[in-house]
Image (cartoon, grey):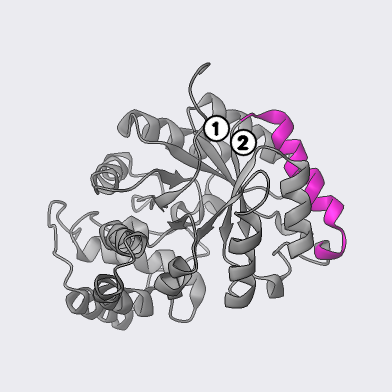
Amino acid sequence: MVGLKPFVPAGVIPACLLPFDDDFSIDEQNYRKHLRHVIGVDGISAITVNAHASEAHACSFDEQCRVLDITKDEVAGVPIVNGIYADGSALAADLARMAEAGGASALLVFPPNSISMGGQLRPEMAAAHFKTIAEATDLPLIIFQYPLGGGLGHTFETLLRLCEEVPTITAIKDWCNDPMLHEKHIRVFQSLSRPVNILTTHSAWLMSSLVMGCKGLLSGAGSVIADLQVELWRAVQAKDLVRARAVNDRIYPMIQAFYAPPFLDMHNRMKETAVILGRIPKAVVRPPLCKLEHTEIVRLEAAVKEADIKVDGSVPRAA
């Protein structure tokens, strides 16, 4: 709206899960309950939808539109970051227009899989993708930075080019998975003449990452442990190392369980943990993702106990 300041991505931003029924349709009732639980955590600055945690890769355009509609209806007043997950720039632009019309406050732009086979040698492809999206919307853009080794991560030089050529880029969700490079991102991009915030998604070493000076975090783990993430964020901001380490000791068992091999099951595990905690009734995932083995669910239950996370029990577990 005219006169309102644009949303600046910073602070603790959980990425929400998306519950499904047994027929793989969206479980709207329990999605609403999940949203209410996440936004009920004191200290979050926004939420993210239509991203990895909500299995955007397996959701149609219309389903993503519906997810945003439900979210906007349920979380009035809380900024919404909407994921833009598309291999083609035209589709990405369509998603951006839909998100802006649906009330999103910012867009999290995933790297298109179409650049994975050598796109790092053609930085103009990344520039074209972001410029196509920027031409479709005035919303702030967040670059989702992947590890370089998989072919989807942008080189440092490309990131710098994107930030210089696309003025609506306001943040980078940094998953470079390289501590040395991560610190460089923090020092350089947050010191530009037009600063670009670094939002860490290095949940496996979150405390170390935050201490480097990130402006916030954007993480799927926040769908389950947003309260602990806020506690850690506040402790780091207060330069209270003793408190930060104590919170990190509780986060540690959950992270060890969530991000164990195979890494692709991380959000699957978060869904199962939400069931364990009584927040959703069942952990249905869409293929090709598959339900976890019982032994892994037992491991998650042990992690919840070690982390001393209270079971909610407001949603009965499905039989």
Per the image, the residue denoted by label 1 is 99
Q: Amino acid at mark 2?
A: Leu
The residue located at (83%, 66%) in the rendering is 118
Tell me where residue 219 appears, x and y as whole percent.
44, 59
Residue 148 visible in the shown view? yes
**Is the residue under label 1 in contact with that under label 2 (CB below 8 Å)?**
yes
The residue located at (74%, 64%) in the rendering is 156
Label 2 to label 1: alpha-carbon separation: 6 Å
By secondary structure, the bulk of the magenta-drawn segment is best described as helix
Q: Is residue 238 above or below residue 244?
A: above
Per the image, the residue denoted by label 2 is 95
Q: Please state the extent of the stretch shown in magenta in the rendering.
A: 120-138
> Is residue 12 in the magenta section?
no
Going by the image, does 215 lie left or right of 34?
Answer: right
User: Closer to the camera, 96 or 179?
Assistant: 179
> Is residue 129 in the magenta section?
yes
Q: Indicate the quadrant where residue 308 lies.
A: bottom left
Q: Is residue 13 above or below residue 137?
A: below
User: Closer to the camera, 234 or 270?
Assistant: 234
- Marking on residue 272: none
Q: What element does badge 2 sit on?
A: helix
Going by the image, does 153 lie left or right of 205?
Answer: right
The quadrant in which the C terminus is found is bottom left
Task: Characterize the local packing of mark 1: few (<14), some (14-19) or many (20 or more) Cα atoms within 10 angstroms.
Answer: many
Residue 290 visible in the shown view? no
Q: Amino acid at mark 1?
A: Ala
Task: Characterize the local packing of mark 2: few (<14), some (14-19) or many (20 or more) Cα atoms within 10 angstroms.
Answer: many
Q: What element does badge 1 sit on?
A: helix
Tell me where residue 203 appears, x and y as whole percent.
44, 69
